[in-house]
Image: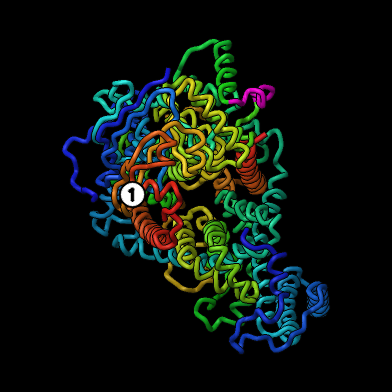
Amino acid sequence: MSKNIEAKDLNIYYGSFRAVEGVNMSIKKKTVTALIGPSGCGKSTFLRSINRMHEVIAGAYVEGKLELDGQDLYGAGMDPVIVRRQIGMVFQRPNPFPTMSIYDNVIAGMKLNNKRASRKEFDETVERSLRGANLWNEVKDRLDKPGSGLSGGQQQRLCIARAIAVQPDVLLMDEPCSALDPISTLAIEDLINELKNDYTIVIVTHNMQQAARVSDYTGFFNIEGTGKPGKLVEMDETKTIFSQPTQKATEDYVSGRFG
Amino acid sequence: MTTTEVTPTPRTARPVTQLGDRVFAGSAKGAGILILVVLAGVAAFLLTEAFPALVAPASELPGEHNLAVYIWPLLFGTLLSALIALVIATPLAICVALFISHYAPRRIAQGLGYLVDLLAAVPSIVYGLWGVGVLAPASVGLMTWLNDYLGWIPLFAGPVSATGRTMLVAGLVLAVMILPIITAVAREVFLQAPRLHEEAALALGATRWEMIKMAVLPFGRSGLISGAMLGLGRALGETMAVAIVLSVSGVVTFNLVSSGNPSSIAANIALQFPEASGLGVNVLIASGLVLFLVTLAVNMLARYIVNRRSEFSGAN
Amino acid sequence: MSTGTERTDTVTQGPELDLPASPDLLPKAKGTLPKGTAWGVFVASALVVGGILAATGFSIGLWVVLTVVLFAVATYVLSRVVEGARKATDRLVTVVVSAAFGVAMIPLVSVLWTVVSNGIARFDAQFFTYSMRGVVGEGGGAYHAILGTLIITGLAAAMSIPIGMLTAVYLVEYGKGRLAKAITFFVDVMTGIPSIVAGLFAYALFALIVGPGVRMGFAGAVALTVLMIPIVVRSTEEMLKIVPNELREASYALGVPKWKTILKIVIPTTAGGIATGITLAIARVIGETAPLLIAVGITTGVNLNPFDDRMATLPVFAYYSYVAPGIPREPFLDRAWTAALVLMVIVMLLNIIARIISRAFAPKTR
């Protein structure tokens, strides 16, 4: 299930604007990798390039290589739709489909991709995914109710359940807790710790305590000024980044002396 | 440093797309193009059918007049009736919109908005029947009064029509018809006025009217102009109400209260078309083309003002 | 709503210290009119005007108008004396603005009342089940016209809804660049086409295909389509724009292709709004008279074939019954008003349905 990600000399463009430059990064399977850095440094862009979500903006493209267990994600004939089926994503704000029940939200990925399955298989997927997202006990009696009736934290876990229901290899999280209260945040962080047994997780966060709590590896992105491309400054085990980083910029940032 | 050179072969310039995507995107695009084709068709077919009238010698045209001589009184009537409607409806619409957006109690404001929208829902034929059946007889008294006391203004020179089927009444009916259009636009811009400006004005101790004068009206000025233009466009093209209400004699006059009035282009087409044949049809279509161009110009001017506003307002 | 009465009331009664510094704006008198003053002045004005009119000759219209005028003047003068010029102006504007709303309601009430009271006489079973074939005086009905209206409007809807919705999808989801700009611009142009011109277009089109003098239901449907498409495009566009991008992204991230995201996520999310817009578009064109007068004409009998010859429609039926009545006149006029009433009822029903749809489809949270 879980796979490694390898970025080699990756440049990301929006039209003629180079947003991210020269990223070389290895992400090991069954680990949590946190991407930190100031706003606009390209960490979210990099994250979205992993499942080609940045291509939603017209004119976006990449140079360099991005591989998932040796499979070139940007190779000729590679459909972004296929890439996204292998690499799930959870967004900043919880976004369950408002027209669907909790049950339908979880199996939305399967249904929309025309996966034929019996009622029993759907039932099993729903239970497995909701249990996987630590939400089963809270919603098992109201699976037919709209997903938008849940609390923010529950909605975010529903979105995680929806993402893992299609059994991806990698789970990308773009500031998944920034719209949540501390208690819900804690629940999500616990969940991330459990999920890494099955998935490769990459998480973008502005919260350095969160990065320190949940991740095994941390990558620090930085930007020299507006209009300049973002770069990966340093990447290492999380405790190294937070205790003895090799770069001055990283040290400044993690110790709060930045900006 | 940012490099601005474009790479020769961006690796995802042509992403692989699914068949379903291509079919769906194609049909969506096709529908859009179809609209362009239809509009080109409107222009082309009108031109084709108007062409015989444009080139025919005056002697073969109805009344043996030059085409311009035939259309001019109609154009005059069109513009005059629409102008009356505009002059009456615009201030009223602004007041109504202000009432709904800033004066009415919040709970019932939306309901009042629906009521005004209902005015827009009434079919034009109903307005025509109402205009000739109710409004025309009811306004004879008003027009007699105008003639008695303001008869020295050419607009009210008289003699007053006994049936009330005058230009003024036609303009009034049109005013009622375009009132909801202008009101809707005005309401929209008033609600968009920045809350902070309003609150700042109130915090300075302004009365409600001073606040509106300071913070709401200046903000909405171009929106109001474009709303009025949209209403004008509608009034220019409105057919049935004028066709039914107005008693027509083909004169060109500013006298709004007499029984001799110029018809409007649209009303003239509606009245003449069912009986027309041969070149008469072509002449009517030529007049329709003129109407089309006039409304087009008015609407484009309105859009131009709206677009200029949206560039400056930062709403996008 | 931007401001309510409550808030502004508290502010206008605020401490004098907050007033603008320029001296000419400061009120000369610092009193306030007691709360019931407005009502008192209003009743007094009504009585005074009523009294004068009772002596000179009473007319309800004049009474209302003069009462409002006197009320406005009296309020202004009273407030000016007690509260100062600024507050007096404020009160005057309040009266004017409220009166304007009242004025705007007069035609609505009058139209509704006129149509209902004149139309109710023939609002009977026969009106809905008989055509005008062979009817010279009383009796008869608009069965043929109602069917014609439904057929022609239905055809117009069947043509304009798919074209309009697909175009809106193109503009919101795909369209970038010059083609999209051109389409947006020309949809705006189309919005301004006078309905009679649309009728002329349909006539010209079919005159070239079939021959001069052509009248048929389908031509009317084409004319209505030209009028309806821009309304459908605009309203659908508005609704699609409301759907948050996050939902599209959530769907893409699940590996759902774009077209399926649009069909299964975006459109269902805003289905209520789109249906409302379409219903209102139908309501808008179902009452159109002029293009049908040009392109379809009128007939006395039932014609269910929109591709063959003239058809009757409700608005045209009402028009001809009123302007070209037979002898005796009254049955024709009655039928005209009843046709207008039926048309109004249909339009109002469509409006109500639109509101119900938008309520029923609003995303649920419980």
Residue C95 percent location from the top left of the image: 69, 72
Between residues A86 and C27, which one lies in front from this camera angle? A86
**Image mark 1: chain:** A
Q: What is the quadrant of the N terminus of chain A in the image?
A: top left
Which residue is the site of mark 1? A223
Q: Quadrant of the C terminus of chain A?
A: bottom left
**Overall secondary structure of the magenta section:** loop
Q: Position of residue C121 (x, y in %)?
A: 72, 44
Label 1: how many Cα within 10 Å (few below 14, some 14–19, many 20+): many
Q: Give the range drawn in magenta.
A: A134-144
How far across and down, in percent of the image, does residue B198 sit?
Answer: 58, 68
- Furthest toward the front, the residue is A244
Residue C257 falls in image quadrant: top left
The relative height of residue A58 versus residue B242 in the rendered view (above or below) is above
Q: How many marks?
A: 1
Residue ID at (81%, 77%): C34
Left/right of residue A137 with respect to residue B274 in the rendered view: right
Q: Nearer the viewer, residue C57 or C333?
A: C57
Q: What residue occupies the far left of the structure in this picture?
A: B8
Residue at (41%, 63%) from the top-left corner?
B312
Secondary structure type for disc 1: strand
Residue B263 lies in the magenta-colored region = no
Does residue C30 appear left or right of residue B208 in this picture? right
| Residue C216 appears in the rendering | no
Q: In the image shown, does A43 or C335 lie closer to the viewer? A: A43
Q: In this view, does B89 lie above or below A125?
A: below
Kindly identify the amino acid type of the residue bearing the numbered disc 1: Ile
Residue placed at 55% from the left, 28% from the top?
A: A191
Between C186 and A218, the one lying in front of the other is: A218
- In this view of the protein, can residue A80 be seen by the observer? yes
In this rendering, would B218 be left or right of B144? left
